[in-house]
């Protein structure tokens, strides 16, 4: 009887300790949950990309294009690849994009390179939400046309004529670009072909501010 009582008391103490620990670390858990589940996964559950694939001049938050975009747009289109450490959609998309551009980088770093697509050079930026500069992190909000903090998987900036002036013209893409890697590659090819065609048509008329 005494042995059973001792076991019950020990179990009660263990449960109480566990509950206390949960209370202590609740803030940390909530922060991680909100950051990973409530924000990053919004990008993964967006509608099919072709429904969202619209180019526009105005940024999502009304701010100017980042300096690193304006500097690179002089030499070609700019391809922004967004990712995160804990992101199921990113795990699907990242290797496809890396293979497509033949670049190699880790998931926990920022990466830049000049890549080539069909004889056209472009600036490629890989940005991890957890391991990047403040300027790169701010660009998420600049190009998040989907709203709700969904954050695009990729953003492509090109050029186009707008009421007498050639301006940066961009599209932000959410989701996983299709159901198979073949569909994702085909989607990238078609989107980049459209972006490069626009760039080549309007580059000579672009006068940076």
Image (tube, helix red, strand yellow):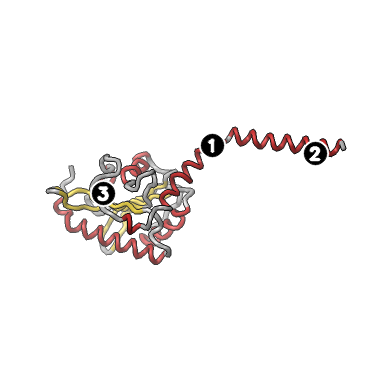
Instruction: Name which of mark 3 and mark 1 comes first in the sequence.
Output: 1
Q: Secondary structure at mark 3?
A: helix
**Residue 129 visible from this viewpoint:** yes
**Which residue is at the front of the view, 102 or 21?**
21
Residue drawn at point x = 86 percent, y = 35 percent: 2
Q: Nearer the viewer, mark 2 or mark 3?
A: 2
Dot 2 or dot 1: first in sequence order is: 2
Q: Residue at x 42, y 48 (%)?
A: 42
* Nearer to the camera, 180 or 130: 180
CA gap, disc 3 to disc 1? 39 Å
Residue 28 has which mark?
Answer: 1
Looking at this view, name the residue that lies furthest to the right.
1
Residue occupied by mark 2: 7
Label 2–label 1 contact, CB within 8 A = no
Question: Is residue 123 visible from the viewing direction of this image?
Answer: no
Which of the two labelled residues, at mark 2 and mark 3, occupies the earlier sequence position? 2
Dot 1: what SS? helix
Q: Contact (CB < 8 A) between labels 2 and 3? A: no
Say which quadrant the C terminus sits in: top left
Where does residue 171 sit, x and y in percent of width and height?
29, 52
Quarter occupied by residue 51: bottom left
The residue at the point 51 percent across, 42 percent down is 33
For residue 47, side relative to residue 204 (left or right): right
Q: Which residue is mark 3?
A: 72
Q: Decide: few, some or many residues near mark 1? Use Cα within 10 Å; few <14, some 14-19, many ≥20.
A: few
Front residue of 149 and 126: 149
Q: Is residue 23 left or right of residue 141?
A: right
Q: Is residue 190 above or below residue 87?
A: below
Residue nearer the viewer, 190 or 41: 41
């Amino acid at each position: 009887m005494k042995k059973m009582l001792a076991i019950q008391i020990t179990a009660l103490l263990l449960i109480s300790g566990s509950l206390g620990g949960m209370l202590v670390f609740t803030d940390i858990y909530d922060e991680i949950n909100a950051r990973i589940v409530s924000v990053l996964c919004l990008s993964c559950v967006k509608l099919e990309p072709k429904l969202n694939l619209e180019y526009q001049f105005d940024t999502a938050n009304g701010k100017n294009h980042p300096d690193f975009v304006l500097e690179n747009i002089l030499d070609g289109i700019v391809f922004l690849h967004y990712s995160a450490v804990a992101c199921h959609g990113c795990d699907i998309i990242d290797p496809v994009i890396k293979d497509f551009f033949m670049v190699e980088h880790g998931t926990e770093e920022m990466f830049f390179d000049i890549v080539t697509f069909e004889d056209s050079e472009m600036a490629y930026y890989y940005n991890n939400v957890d391991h990047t500069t403040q300027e790169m992190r701010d660009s998420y909000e600049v190009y998040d046309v989907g709203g709700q903090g969904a954050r695009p998987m990729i953003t492509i900036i090109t050029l186009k004529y707008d009421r007498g002036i050639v301006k940066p013209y961009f599209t932000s893409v959410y989701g996983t670009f299709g159901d198979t890697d073949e569909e994702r590659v085909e989607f990238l090819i078609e989107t980049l072909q459209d972006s490069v065609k626009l760039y080549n048509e309007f580059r000579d008329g672009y006068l940076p501010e």
